[in-house]
Image (tube, grey):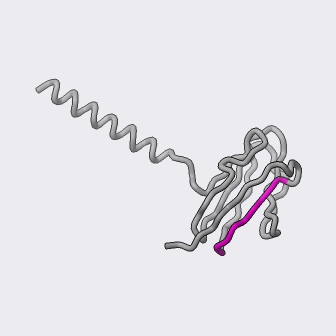
């Protein structure tokens, strides 16, 4: 009986830990700027999603869409910029200070 209780306790602990990991999963509407790159480089989100870019580099960066729909100021370390996507489409973006840094947000209809 004791072994059964221990096994049940171990299973409960594993389930709790697994649930905790799921709760801490990365926000699908968040992009981190680190080591001169956007991560993830490409994301897909439903219409109405607010995407937030957070600069974790010691250097400033920007987030600018190629079609002119959004444009951040220079983001220093730990600064962020958010934009809410209200229309489906593909939005390519880059850093004006480091043009080799590029990314893409694909916005799909809700459903």
Front residue of 21/45: it is 45
Is 71 left or right of 46, judged from the image as shown? Answer: right
Give the magenta part as a residue range: 87-95
Is 84 left or right of 73, judged from the image as shown? Answer: left
Q: Give the residue at x 76% y 38%.
A: 35
Q: Is residue 21 above or below residue 91?
A: above
On the image, the x and y values in percent for residue 87 come to: 66, 75
Report the residue that reaches farthest toward the right: 97
On the image, the x and y values in percent for residue 19 come to: 39, 44
Report the residue that reaches farthest toward the top: 2
Q: Give the residue at x 78% y 66%.
A: 70
Front residue of 12/37: it is 37
Front residue of 14/65: it is 65
- The count of marks equals 0
Q: Is residue 29 above or below residue 1?
A: below
- 74 part of magenta stretch: no
Quadrant where the N terminus lies?
Answer: top left
Task: Quadrant for residue 10, please give it.
Answer: top left
On the image, the x and y values in percent for residue 97 come to: 88, 50
Q: Give the residue at x 78% y 42%.
A: 36
Q: Is residue 60 above or below residue 28?
A: above
Q: Give the residue at x 59% y 70%.
A: 108
Q: Main secondary structure of the magenta part?
A: strand
Report the residue that reaches farthest toward the left: 1
Front residue of 66/69: it is 66
Task: Quadrant for residue 104, please give it.
Answer: bottom right
């Amino acid at each position: 009986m004791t072994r059964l209780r221990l096994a049940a306790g171990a299973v409960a602990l594993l389930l709790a830990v697994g649930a905790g990991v799921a709760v801490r999963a990365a926000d699908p509407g968040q992009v981190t700027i680190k080591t001169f790159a956007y991560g993830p480089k490409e994301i897909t989100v439903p219409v109405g999603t607010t995407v937030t870019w957070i600069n974790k580099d010691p250097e400033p960066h920007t987030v600018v869409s190629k079609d002119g729909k959004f444009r951040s100021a220079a983001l220093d370390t730990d600064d962020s910029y958010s934009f809410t996507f209200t229309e489906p489409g593909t939005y390519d973006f880059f850093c004006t200070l480091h043009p080799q840094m590029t990314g893409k947000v694909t916005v799909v209809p809700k459903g």
